[in-house]
Image (spheres, rainbow, N blue to C red):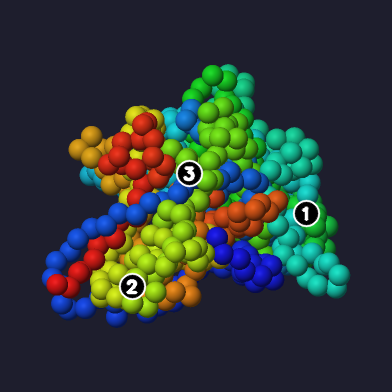
Amino acid sequence: MYKTSFIKKALLAVMAVFLYSCDKDFNAIGDGLIGDDHFGLEAEKYDVVAFNQEVTPIQSNTMTPNALGILDNPLFASTTANFVTQVGLSSYPIKVGDSPVIQSVVLEIPYFSHATATDNEGNTTYVLDSIYGDKNGKIKLSVYESGIQMRSSYLSGGTQLPQFYYTDQNTDFFNNKLGNRLNDEKATDGTFKDDQFFFDANEIRIETTDDKGAKTTTRKAPQMTLQLNKQFFQDRILNADASKLAAEDVFQEYFRGLYFNVEKSGSNPSSLALMDFSKGVITIKYKAKTSSTTDDPEATEDKEILLNLKGTSTTTANFLQDTRNADYQSAITTNVNKTDGDERLYLKGGVGSLAVIKLFNPTDVLSYDSNGAVVNGANGVSDQLDEIRSNVTIKNWKVNEANLVFYIDADKMAGAQEPNRVYLYNLTDNTILADYSTDAVSAYGGVISKGTDKRGKSYKIRITSHIRNLVKDATVKNVDLGLVVSLSPTTVAFNALKEKNAITPVVPRTSLLNPLGTIIYGGKVSTSTPEDKRLKLEVYYTKPN
């Protein structure tokens, strides 16, 4: 790994943390290395040193989607995901009205889903997306008023800095929750209904009858629907002093948000969902005296107040607690081999692990002069890279294509839910690769390849432009690469680690958002690693006669 100044790294890290998208078009770099005189393609393979790196607590505020639930993965860990969010009124100020009497309070948050069929009566069948673990899994879900006022920034030395919240802060919010559980609806047996909460894929159908007896059916896609405690919202909202409902900053000091806590539901299998909480709405329906001067002074009218889980300066945080499998824990901590690489690479999202990828064998005992002759002595560059540069310069080899193919350990992953995508990036500078900026969705790759048994075989990532840049310019450094599981090919922001380590100060957000993991073969020569599945760099050349 080459060295850069501390200031440069710090600036890169700060910029990366606040990068939310990368939608600009970039020109392909190094296209001139490909000529029209293709006399044939030949593949060369080069060594790769790859090892595991633990991901420690990480910044998790103000991102979408968020995880909620419990995912039991015996290969990696049991992950518990809790969540906290500010709440805002739909408008300011609001006028509640005289003598308000609450009727109902309902919290609704849509799930990610897609329709599969609609019958003749208009009933639609849905499938939930972004559900992990047992599809019918149950959890104990409790919603509380938060006792911590979350802020988007804080003042330090006269400078306004962003406020970060981290994945390991669940205890802080749990210990500071206020009052009793808000989703206290009872089941027929007297227990709390949401003690056995599950992510229901059924269409929401609400039938109403008007004064003339006409029936209307309202349909909604699957969503979380929680009945909240009416007396709490009568006291906190309807009976609140008008000044508390007059402006957002005042309201968020007064009502500090909602904290979602999950636990195991007895011996039931559990599940975890990714959700867009920013689309959540609390609807308070109530009756208040009519404002009309011509009506009976005791007449009432139906009114409602909306509370959004996304205000104009929303602050949220996802708390991820992992109880790791012992083998997995040792693989990413005590048994890491940074010199020769690891036999298996364990990639897991959330507070999990990534792989550090170093291209080429590190042996450095020679170089080449301008005539292509071997010169003994180290020059700070891998001998394999020196050889490629010489072949391109002296022999006029053309780099047609370069790939990294990561083969899945099918035996270890048997029966496990697999991530659909992995993401490779510049770990040294925490930036995207040239190939990614050219075509992040299709040509770059990273999507799982499956066999006839529908199980994952490999992930292939194209790094042609990266290799072209590296071989055409001797001043370009051979940076370390990072490999993580990925939720979305368009999410390129980075989130800060709570405690910076020697490898990196940040981790790609796309990995934090994906709760799954995979086990792939590394580049270390080993009797337990099939040679045809060992990680290598594949480079295809055009070699003139």
Mark 2, residues whose alpha carbon is within 10 Å: few (<14), some, or many (≥20)?
some
Residue 39 x %, y %: 13, 71
According to the picture, the residue beneath numbered tag 1 turns out to be: 149
Q: Give amino acid for label 1.
A: Gln
According to the picture, the residue beneath numbered tag 2 turns out to be: 372
Mark 1 residue element: loop
Mark 3 residue element: loop
Q: Is residue 81 above or below residue 434?
A: above
Residue lying at 31% horizontally and 45% vertically, measured from the top left: 458
Residue 387 x %, y %: 35, 65
**Quadrant housing residue 207:** top left
Q: Residue furthest front?
A: 376
Chain-order first, disc 3 or disc 2: 3
Residue lying at 34% horizontally and 54% vertically, measured from the top left: 46
Mark 2 residue element: loop
Which-is-in-front pick, marks 1 and 3? Answer: 3
The tag on residue 316 is none
Q: Give amino acid for label 2.
A: Gly
Q: Quadrant of the N terminus?
A: bottom right
Q: Is residue 361 visible?
A: yes
Residue lying at 57% horizontally and 55% vertically, measured from the top left: 507
According to the picture, the residue beneath numbered tag 3 turns out to be: 341
**Considering depth in this image, is 117 or 134 the residue closer to the camera?**
134
**Considering depth in this image, is 321 or 393 the residue closer to the camera?**
393
Q: Is residue 537 above or below residue 131?
A: below
Q: CA distance from mark 1 to mark 2?
A: 66 Å
Residue 19 x %, y %: 57, 68
